[in-house]
Image: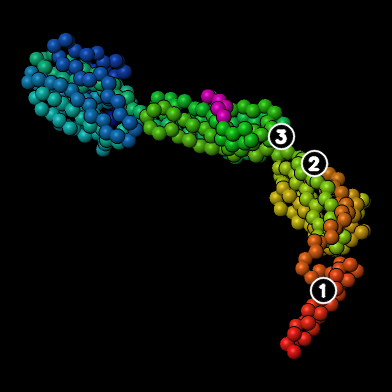
Amino acid sequence: MGVGGCLVLPWRCLVVLSLRLLFLVPAGVPVRSGDATFPKAMDNVTVKQGESATLRCTVDDRVTRVAWLNRSTILYAGNDKWSIDDRVVILTNTKTQYSIKIHNVDIYDEGPYTCSVQTDNHPKTSRVHLIVQVPPQIINITSDITVNEGSSVTLLCLAFGRPEPTVTWKHLSGSKGQGFMSDDEYLEITGITRDQSGEYECSAVNDVAAPDIRRVKVTVNYPPSISSAKNKGVSVGQRGTLSCEASAVPVAEFQWFKEETRLANGLDGVRIENKGRMSTLTFFNVSEKDYGNYTCVAINKLGNTNASIILYEISESPPLAGPGAVHDGNNAASRAMACLWLSGTLFAHFLLKF
């Protein structure tokens, strides 16, 4: 507190000054432990953020006055509370122990605490250092992004914790599967390819608690590429279908042409269906005029590609003869002979009765 403050509240300054002189703990000066005969408090107390910390100080029956200080701030003097923080409470004040407790510890509570006692007219101090552990937490990460193939991409993942967490990046998806990518907050990809699209996982670890894990989806746009387009043979009068498959991001739109004429769905007995990466051209009743060369065109905002597909005629195989089937004159003659033989047999049977 400055001199001006003392002019306003002289009684308050007098009390603080008396305590500082009593315990010999000047503001801003590091505190040293007392003589070897005075039992020291534990050197370090480690707790996780949100837990309670107990600071203990061992005393004996020679002690006449006791106090707990945080740096130069008086928390307790005997049983009198000086701190306005409701989380700080007196835990024990006996002839052998003087302890305080801090509930719901946070990172700003970390630092040195001093137990100061007056004994045999000789002040002594003992120091405790409070260490606050904080679970890893990702505080900033790149949002899902969409880029064109060949671009350079930088992914950012900032994490906080005590101890400072280790940050790693891993590629979870894509045609090459999972793979370790980086052990840094930044992941840089130069000339990204379509195989490097998918989910990227950032993990922050410091062994205080479970890792904090977040994911970023990277979408890589690329022009269409037709992967499947085969010629098809169909007989006249039959149903026929031509198929065209193209990979692209965004998904490709399809167009069908015969020679230079673009085909329309539902006209001239054809149907065009587009589902995802596949487009089909269906003929419900193939005629001679349907045979020929067709072109499938796949288009998205990055470009287009095409493939030529031929619908050609094939001969229909004659069906196999079944029982009673008539195919030519020889079969008809055989049937006549069978009828004649059956008639003769019936006539002979009739004569035998008489």
Earlier along the polypeptide chain: callout 1 or callout 3? 3
**In the picture, residue 346 is in which quadrant?**
bottom right
Q: CA distance from mark 3 to mark 2?
A: 12 Å
> Which of pointers 2 and 1 indicates the residue nearer the eye?
1
Q: Which residues are magenta?
A: 179-183
Q: What crowding class fits label 2: few (fewer than 14 Cα within 10 Å), some (14-19), or many (20 or more)?
A: few
User: In the displayed structure, does residue 239 sit left or right of residue 77?
Assistant: right
Compare marks 3 and 2 and give the one earlier in the sequence.
3
In the image, what residue type sits under mark 1? Ala
- The C terminus lies in which quarter of the figure? bottom right
Q: Residue at x 13, y 21 (%)?
A: 59
What residue is drawn where x is 62% and y is 30%?
A: 154
Quarter assignment of residue 291: bottom right
| Left or right: 40 as drawn, with respect to 204 | left
In x, y percent, where is residue 205? 44, 29
- The residue indicated by pointer 2 is 303
**Which residue is farthest top?**
36
Label 1 vs label 3: CA separation? 79 Å
| Residue at mark 3 | 149
Mark 3: secondary structure = loop
- Whether residue 318 can be seen here: yes
Q: Main secondary structure of the magenta part?
A: strand
Is 166 displayed left or right of 209 in the figure? right
| Label 3, residues with CA under 10 Å away: few <14, some 14-19, many ≥20 | many
- Circle 2: residue type: Gly
Q: Is residue 109 visible?
A: no
Q: Nearer the viewer, residue 28 or 247?
A: 247
- The residue beneath circle 1 is 338
Question: Mark 2 and 1 residues: CB-CB less than 8 Å, in contact?
Answer: no
